[in-house]
Structures are given as structure tokens and as C-alpha cells.
Image (cartoon, rainbow, N blue to C red):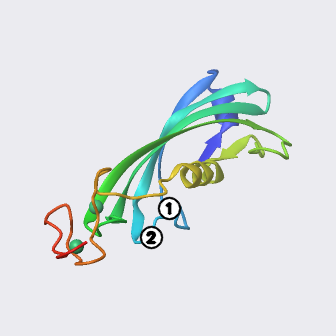
Amino acid sequence: MILDLKKLKRSGKDSSGFFFEYSPETELCDVPNAKIVLPIKISGTVTLTGEHSAYIDGEAVFSIAGECTRCLKDTENFYAISFQEQVEENNPDGYQVKNDTVDLRTIVDDAVMINSPVSFLCDENCKGICTGCGVNLNDEECKCKNK
Ligand SMILES: [Zn+2]
Ligand SMILES: [Zn+2]
């Protein structure tokens, strides 16, 4: 997932679009019993901002499939995460341009990790499972007799 700034400069344009399908080596989603469905689709625009620097405006689109954290129902939710980064050569605090190329992997890994959901629900109003009688409260009435 490499953006080649040299090639972009040679084309005589300031910016160009990109599209990648990306399968990260590590799981980027922290939700238990749920995983990102691979590949993640990455698209966006890279714009030259200097001799060896660029601005990246991108979007990562994916779904997460697994068990609803509250009721354990099989669920697949869709996410679109946007990221904007200025990349420079010799930039110790940020993402680097190396040999006029930008490796998007770390940028995307970070963006997905920071923005991936902390709770994973079949529905935001999911009522979950009764800890008393164990029924899925979305489908059934609680069977606990008293309190
Ligand atoms: Zn649920
Ligand atoms: Zn109950």
C-alpha cells in the first residue's frame, strides 16, 4: 500500500486518487468475539504540498462481524473511517515520506484502531440477556418470577 510521490510529480499533476484493498497483519478491532471482515477498502486522494511532502485525505471502509456484546446475536455492522494526514520527510513526530514514497499501512492501522468501536451491538437499543433467567430480552419477556 505504497503511494509513489515521484510518479505523481512525473505525471505533472498535484494530486491523484488511490484505491487499495488491505488486509492488516494484526487484528485492529478490540471488540471481543468480533473481527473486521477483510479486506478493508481504502480510497482517497494524495496531494503534493512540497518537494517531499504530501497531504493524504482517505477513507477506510469495512464491516465488523461477530457477536453482539450484549445479547450474543450474530451481527455485522458497517463502518467508514476517514483520515487526514500531512506526511513529511524527516518528520519524527508524524508519518514519514521515505524515498518519495508513503507507506499507508501505519496510517490506516492507527486510524482504524483509534476509531474502531468500543461496543459492538446488534442494535443501539439492544436489551441484552437477562442475567437472572437468561432469555434474550429483545425476543422474549423476562421469566424471572419476582424481582
Ligand atoms: Zn444485541
Ligand atoms: Zn429474567
**Residue drawn 54% across and 51% down?**
112
- Which quarter of the frame holds ligand 2? bottom left
- Identified by mark 2, the residue type is Pro
Describe residue 13's horizontal placement relative to residue 121 as left or right.
Answer: right
Residue 98 is situated, as x and y percent measured from the top left of the image, at 77, 46
State the residue lying farthest toward the front. Answer: 146
- Quadrant hosting residue 35: bottom left
**Residue drawn 67% across and 31% down?**
55
Describe residue 75's horizontal placement relative to residue 36 as left or right.
Answer: left
Residue under pointer 2: 32
Describe residue 72's horizontal placement relative to residue 141 as left or right.
Answer: right
For the residue with label 2, is its CB less than 8 Å from the closest atom of ligand 1?
no
Q: Which is nearer the eye, 22 or 74?
A: 74
Q: Residues within 10 Å of mark 2 (few under 14, many from 20)?
A: few
Residue 42 is situated, as x and y percent measured from the top left of the image, at 48, 44
Q: Which is nearer the eye, 16 or 58?
A: 58
Describe residue 110's horizontal placement relative to residue 40 as left or right.
Answer: right
| Residue 127 in the image: above or below residue 17 | below
**Residue drawn 64% across and 22% down?**
14
- Quadrant hosting residue 70: bottom left
- Quadrant hosting residue 54: top right
Q: Secondary structure at mark 1?
A: loop
Residue 64 is situated, as x and y percent measured from the top left of the image, at 38, 58
Residue under pointer 1: 29
| Residue 22 in the image: above or below residue 81 | below
Q: Which is nearer the eye, 61 or 23?
A: 61
- Identified by mark 1, the residue type is Cys
Question: How far apart in space, not on screen, are marks 2 and 1 (Cα)?
Answer: 8 Å
Tally the numbered discs: 2
Question: Are the residues tagged 2 and 1 within 8 Å (C-beta)?
Answer: no
| Residue 73 in the image: above or below residue 17 | below
| Residue 28 in the image: above or below residue 56 | below
